[in-house]
Image (cartoon, rainbow, N blue to C red):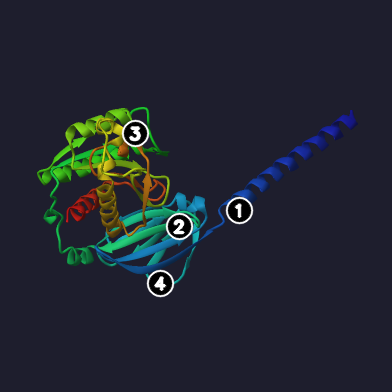
Amino acid sequence: MENVYIMRKTVLTAVIFFILGVVVFSQTRGSAGTEKADVTARAGKQSTSSGEVVRMVFESEEAFIKKANVFSSGMQLNVEFPSVFNLKPQKGFNFETSIKDRVLIINIKEPFEIKVLRLSSPPRLVIDILSSKSKGTTDTKPQSEVVLSQKVFVLDPGHGGYDFGIISDDLKEKDIALSIAKDIEGLLIKKGKKVYLTKRSDQFMSLKDRAVLANQKMPEIFLSIHVSASENFVVYTPEIADTSSEMSIAELYSLSSRQKRYVKKSIALAENIGKAIKEEFNLNVVQREMSLPILNSVGAPAILIEVPSFKIMSYDQKTLARLAEAVIKGFSYYAQ
């Protein structure tokens, strides 16, 4: 009986030590998990068509950058990271700052607007800051003064219905493309232009149906809108093997040959749209030729735009409006 008692006491003691060990291990892991991440910060100034822009760049681990949130409050810029962090200022980062828990508070000292980008290789959070004062003194040509000679436009929001396109969290390519198209439409209508969308709601539409509708409207410009998986704006123009002006009777009635006589104008349109986008966003614009059915089938200057990945650009209402205005400006450059 005594042996049984001793055995039970030994087992109980072992269990107690095991539980204590688990608790200590958990506490050790918890304290290790709260170890501060290093965030390097640098800044510099760039001149753009909108004025002088201050660009802040924050670098850290990919997961840390991906989950960071940026918001403004009065004349303060707030960068909220997913956990506590060590800020390591580098070249040009000479700002009044304070850290409250997981939030870096930066004093800008004057009203400002921001644009937020997330870049990879290495992971970076990029914040462009334009002061309202700077913007007011450099915008010498209001948007209302942009003159367009074209009268008829067809806008083609990519994907739709069960075809979501690129998806990231709760964002879908089909929704962003439709929003951009409607914003461009609104600006064109204000200028007295005729504008047709290949679709006005979230619905699937085949490429053939889109091309047929576009040709029925006899547009002077055709623009298809998509979202890219890359960090850049990409502008596609049709790739036609035979660009000779002569067309057979069969080619005249073939969808696949409609673009043949407009290739050079499509390239010029792409160049001018790219120029306007680069001026507005100060980002790289890649121009590519590709044999895309939707472009090759339209009898008008036609291009396809892919805006940057959801991981790079925040598609809030202000960004969408800037995109629409840049496209309108590109149309005006093309008309000159």
Q: Residues within 10 Å of mark 3 (few under 14, many from 20)?
A: many
Label 3 sits on a secondary structure element that is loop
Q: Who's the residue at 26% across and 37% down the image? A: 247
- What is the secondary structure assignment of the residue under circle 1? helix
Q: Which of the numbered marks, if any, corresponds to residue 32?
A: 1
Q: Amino acid at mark 2?
A: Arg
Q: Quadrant of the image for the C terminus?
A: bottom left
User: Disc 3 versus disc 1: distance between alpha carbons?
Assistant: 46 Å
Q: Residue at x 35, y 44 (%)?
A: 239
Q: Which badge, 1 or 4, comes first in the chain's sequence?
A: 1
Query: In percent of the image, x 30 and y 46: which residue is there?
Result: 316
Total marks placed: 4
Which of marks 4 and 3 precedes in the sequence?
A: 4
Q: Earlier in the sequence, mark 3 or mark 2?
A: 2
Mark nearer the viewer, 3 or 2: 3
**As drawn, 307 above or below 108:** above
Q: Position of residue 226 (x, y in %)?
A: 34, 41
Q: Earlier in the sequence, mark 2 or mark 4?
A: 4
| Cα distance in 3D space between marks 3 and 4 | 43 Å
Location of residue 133 with respect to 237 vertically, above or below: below
Residue 329's quadrant in the figure? bottom left
- Name which residue type carries label 1: Ala
Question: Residue shown at 23%/30% (left/top)?
Answer: 213
Which mark is nearer the camera, 1 or 4? Answer: 4
Q: Position of residue 272 (x, y in %)?
A: 25, 54
Q: In the image shown, does 141 or 69 lie closer to the viewer?
A: 141
Q: Which residue is mark 4?
A: 92
Mark 2 burial class by Cα count in 10 Å: few <14, some 14-19, many 20+: many
Give the residue number, with chain letter if any, for mark 2. Answer: 124
